[in-house]
Amino acid sequence: MKRIEKKLKELSQDNQKAFVGYIVAGDPDLETSLELMHLCVDSGVDILEIGVPFTDPIAEGPTIQQAHDRSLENDTNLQKILDLIGRFRKKDTETPIILMGYINNFLMYTDLINRSDELGVDGVLVVDIPGEFSLKDSGIDNKNLDIISLVSPTTSRERIQQIAANSSGFIYYVTLRGVTGSSNLDGNEIKKNIQYIKSISMTPVMAGFGIKTKDDAKLLSSFSDGIVIGSSIVELIHKNSENKDFHEVSDYISNMKDAIR
Amino acid sequence: MKDNLPDKDGFFGEYGGKFVPETLMYALNELEQTYKTLKDNNDFNAEFHRDLAEFVGRPSPLYFAKRLTEHYNTASIWLKREDLNHTGAHKINNTVGQILLAKYMGKKRIIAETGAGQHGVATATVAARLGLDCHIYMGSEDVRRQSLNVYRMKLLGAEVHEVNSGSATLKDALNEALRDWVTNIEDTYYIIGSVTGPHPYPMIVRDFNAVVGYELIDQSQESFGRMPDSIIACVGGGSNAMGIFYPFIKMDNVELIGVEAAGKGIETGEHAAPLNDGTPGVLHGAKSYLMQDESGQVKGTASISAGLDYPGVGPEHSWLKDIKRAKYVAVSDDEVMKAFHMVNKMEGILPALETAHAFAHLDELMPKMKKDQHIVINVSGRGDKDLNSVVEIEDIKL
């Protein structure tokens, strides 16, 4: 069984919701990213989403954009990120890892991406490839990798069906109209849309974009299979990057994990 | 030669497509459907062409450049005078068309990106005419270079948002406009200013600008009794070039030449010439030639002209390059300044710095031409907006 499926099954058997945590690889540097990946898992993150930095990340709000810029100043690239994941796997062989990024970076490394399952990657989420299009057209073809697709409040029901049919691992429901880190969640709309996705697909659904507080997390996890948090974690990492004391990150993650229990 | 592209997924050969975050798909599909319905609608077309005639002042003249012709003493040089349009550039053709789409779709809020400010001014102009809320994104470096146009947009009632992220130029203005659109997707129409971006934009912007090429067919026939031998246009994103090239793609004996910005020189790497020195990649929703490094990060650009200072180019140009239907050359900032002065002194025309790139190719092209041939330069815009830059570049005290 693939790692994502296995993890989500275990959580579901325990009546638990999944916590997907996002960090940008190479922010503040790759050594610290390795430490932060383990810290996230130790504090309650079930699935790691590793952001691949891009010069022009159009779906990101200022917090994550700036993290991409900081990482690029260290010359982070996909090769180095896969090395990082290889090192993480020496200690942790169970936590699923998803690469999240933009197609232009993936295009330069298709051979590497197609071997990345051997290096410990479990899934890819390409933000700017809409879910009804196949990643095979962009040269990414490996059945051992789950292809995570986005569904948003503006996705038509017809397209949700196509996207659900093409997705594996989980479906990522974008909870708002906006970039990452915004704040205008509409609980009723989110509930209605996630219930629709679940009515036509067996694939688990995670809710993300704009989740900041325990209340947000609690509400959204009540009708999804889990939540994704990015900007808040990235912001706390940046705030503490100078002294490299990340207990604030760890406290935040355990609080959010408690909220969705 | 195929001129029926893009295909149903928005591709010109391997270029184009819709590489966007999910939230935008709804708006792109809505726009595509609306355009499909309206483009053959008589009322819509009548309104578009009435606006082009009465508000823009079309057709723009085809003018014989007598002294330039005598100077090179080979082929006849003709100028397609888009600089005489209302607001001073070809950009108004596309905005007049797109604002009509916005009106038919019932959108109340207009956003746009701008580099040189010409597209921002053209957008603010058409939005003012319909009383629509208008927001223009512009890199802070360009705000400085093109302060007159910034003031013009404000006079027209638009709000200008200065963009400081990345290189603070056109590319970053586009990023911010896309982020605005993702956030305000339902009531907002995004008027993209070039033949770039996700499908259906490269097609829509080309179609609205193709009025330039269609007029040229008739005017060439009237002025010299046949089609031109060569058509020359500057290429940043490529909208003025695509507009004048498009009706001629299937006429194999008409040479199409796009001129990119070589900045400080192609060999220095400090330029804005993806068709000359780039590789295929994906930026701003489309696959096309792109200035990027070996990791797929987009490189910074350099050009004397804000309107050409962009690392990507329209996907249809990438396709025309690969199938060798159009030829793409590049000229340096120094060559551009020389041409800028030449056109002022010999023809009494103040070209935009973007447009001066097309003229700068004449030194190379004209010696190869014959006396009985005819070439056309697309004079994409006028240079009033660039006077501050020119004064600064040449260190002149006014």
Image: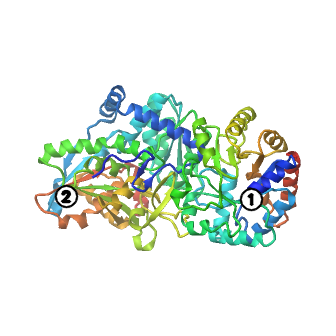
Q: Residue at position x 26%, y 60% from top?
A: B342
| Residue A77 seen anywhere in this rendered image of the structure | no
- Tell me residue A251's x, y (percent): 88, 55
Q: Horizontal placement of B320 versus B80: left or right? A: right
Residue A253 figure quarter: bottom right
Q: How many marks?
A: 2
- Tell me residue B391's x, y (percent): 40, 58
Which is nearer the eye, B6 or B327? Answer: B6
**Where does label 1 land, which residue?**
A1
Instruction: Assign the C terminus of chain B to one quadrant of the image.
Output: bottom left
The amino acid marked with disc number 1 is Met
Q: Horizontal placement of B222 versus A181: left or right? A: left
Q: Residue at position x 50%, y 28% from top?
A: B106
Which is nearer the eye, B315 or B381? Answer: B315
Which is nearer the eye, A2 or B337? Answer: A2
- Tell me residue B63's x, y (percent): 20, 47
State which chain disc 2 sits on: B
Q: Residue at position x 49%, y 28% from top?
A: B131
Q: Colour scheme used in the picture? A: rainbow
SS label for mark 1: loop
For disc 2, the neighbor class at 10 Å (few under 14, some 14 to 19, many from 20) is some
Compared to A39, does B53 lie above or below? Answer: above
Residue mark closest to the camera, 1 vs 2: 1
Q: Residue at position x 61%, y 40% from top?
A: A161
Q: Do labels 1 and 2 share a chain?
A: no
- Tell me residue B393's x, y (percent): 42, 62
Label 1 vs label 2: CA separation?
Answer: 74 Å
For disc 1, the neighbor class at 10 Å (few under 14, some 14 to 19, many from 20) is few
What numbered label is drawn on residue B68? 2
